[in-house]
Amino acid sequence: MSEARDSGALLLRPDVYYTRSGDGLYMLTHDGPVIFGGSSVHPLLVRLAPYLNGRHSLAELTENLSGERREMVRGLLAALVRRGAIKQVPERDGEPADDAVNGRRDEVSFLGYFHDTRERAERAFRAYQDERVLIVGAGGSAAAMADAARRSGIASVRVVEGGPVEGAGLVVHLGGPSAAEMERACAEAGADLVLGLVLDGSLWCAATGPRVGDGPGATSIELRRAARRPGPAAPAAWDGVPGRVASAQLMHQVFRSLTGVGRPEPGTVTRLDPRTLARRTHTVVPHPFDSTSPPPTESGDARLDEDDFSRRAARLVDDHVGVFGPPTERDFVQLPLHVCEMEVSDPVGLLGPGARPARATGAGLGFAAARLAAALAAFSAYGSLMIDPRRLTGPDGEPAFPGEDDPFHALALLRDGAWREVYVPGRAAASGRERFVRVARAFPALRSADVPFAVPPEIVSAYSRRDAVTAGVLACVRRLALDAAPGDAPRVDVADVPHDPVTSRYLTILDALGEDVTLHRLGGDFPAPTVHCQIGASARGCASGLSMAGALRDALGAAILDHQSRLHGQPDYAPPPVPPLPADGPLRPAPAGRCDLDTVVAALAARGHEPVVVPLDHDPEVSAVMPYTVHVVMADA
């Protein structure tokens, strides 16, 4: 924002509206609303407004004031300059002549809000008038776009159905050659490109080039939209009223970009709903298949901060083209646990056509905890669905599909059975040595196209790599313990287990429910204990932990969530089912102490199991936000 200077005349922008409000002063500027508190602010601006006409400087307006009054006026005017309501112009900078820049006074006046002098505004508009624009398309859509370009002030506008783009400074693509071909041609020619796409009943615009913006590629837009599995939509086209409105909006943004007013935010597109003519901006994250080779994924070991993670994850959320849909509580009952859900995109179509969109749920004792849990579950689900065949290998470690340029064709081969001899690299949790895992084990959605897909508990996202690996290994321990659970598994008295604050809250909830709670310890003498919890007759949860206290906490949370889901008939957020155990097992003392991950991995190896950690990082943009999504696969030691 600009700072008020003593020199330079002050001009209250003509497009600023203001009124008294309950808080003091409410202003509507070209950049949005501005609110100032204080009962004296509105009367003061009313008195100053006649002098904010571009003919008086800050020093002149305050030279006859003294003390507190002078500082009050200076403070208000400085604040209005910073918020864009007042513009500083050269003193007594008059209006442009009637014939200035071929009679385009309105355009020059508009640009004057964003340039220091009228001369600079005129130069910017003259350069815009001299722009050479090529519109690629046919029919009414191309004609509407050409008309919008000429109305905006551009003199040289050509309409073609295809062909070379040499000689054009700006290309608007509405049809004809594929958008990807046009992107390559414009990149080679050094021309700016604006894409007009029709997707799912809406009109989409994206700008890429050195002057117009850093928008996403057409492939990314189309793949991200398709990954959200949109339903049937009414047909749309650039013809008719919606097309003319979209053309005018597109050219207005081009005008702003080329004249130095402002470019779109990087990675954004605009969408026009032809039914309502509402216009929205969306962020599109580049899709891995928008690159001719698999982009590298950077990985580190630094622990993520929860607040920073939440802010960075927000760019992946969008209700039309996002990696994830916005978090929602739907109609879920929020007692005793808060519950949140996020829709997860199917980035390469692993779930098959017509499949229900994947959804991830999270629960917690508070609103924020539930949303963070849902976000972590969403990253796990996405990682399990995003497979780049260019990252896969054969049994010898060589590329699985050498010379294959089309990743979708390679995916089709995988779905047809080629996965039996295709592998993905992982690392043994104990030794760190490289081990190859069959791709269908690492990405189980490859084999589950005909049944509803559920993310295995061994696929985990966490705030650090060690936390993710630990949670994945403990999920393997839980599975082994349930598979081997004896009919006479020993019971545990909840009073024998230390309680952390979360466990204490859970026990308070159980007291309020008034249901009987039965705890069993599974796994025998395995160092990582597994707790089976049953509430009443049917609600159950099971968890393994590095300590009895951790296993109890997580088992109680899962059982309470299962009870909540059953009580209210809301199975969408129910945890994975847990088989029942007899309630009359022998009562045994709870083991004390705590083990570590290395001890658990060594104990698994002694029983013939080797946990292999497979990073699910085939989307670098997503992995940059959450680098610790892994699938812990149990291999033979």
Image: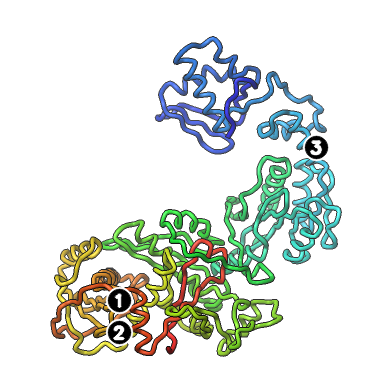
Marks 1,2: beta carbons within 8 A: yes
Looking at the picture, tell me which residue is in the foreground, 595 or 276.
595
Looking at this view, name the residue that lies furthest to the front: 431
Question: Would residue 572 appear left or right of 451 to someone viewing this image?
Answer: left
Q: Is residue 326 depicted above or below 418 in this figure?
A: above
Q: Residue at x 58, y 19 (%)?
A: 58
Looking at the picture, tell me which residue is in the foreground, 230 or 412.
412
> Is the C terminus in the top left, top right, bottom left or bottom right quadrant?
bottom left
> Is the N terminus in the top left, top right, bottom left or bottom right quadrant?
top right
Residue that badge 3 annotates: 126
Looking at the picture, tell me which residue is in the foreground, 319 or 477.
477
Q: Is residue 452 depicted above or below 465 in this figure?
A: below
Point out which mark residue 481 bears. Answer: 2
Q: Secondary structure at mark 3?
A: helix
Q: Mark 3 against mark 2, which lies toward the viewer?
A: 2
State the count of labels: 3
Question: Would residue 134 appear left or right of 1 to someone viewing this image?
Answer: right
Q: Secondary structure at mark 1?
A: strand
Q: Residue at x 33, y 85 (%)?
A: 480
Q: Residue at x 38, y 62 (%)?
A: 340
Q: Position of residue 278 (x, y in %)?
A: 58, 50
Pick whichever of labels 1 and 2 is earlier in the sequence. 2
In which quarter of the view is residue 290 placed?
bottom right
Marks 3,2: beta carbons within 8 A: no
Work out how far the residue at label 3 is from the one at label 2, CA to CA, in angstroms.
Answer: 76 Å
Q: Amino acid at mark 3?
A: Arg
Work out how far the residue at label 1 is from the one at label 3, CA to CA, in angstroms.
Answer: 71 Å
Residue that badge 1 annotates: 544
User: How many residues crowd mark 2 within 10 Å: few (<14), some (14–19), many (20+)?
Assistant: many
Q: Mark 1 against mark 3, which lies toward the viewer?
A: 1
Marks 1,3: beta carbons within 8 A: no
Q: Amino acid at mark 2?
A: Ala
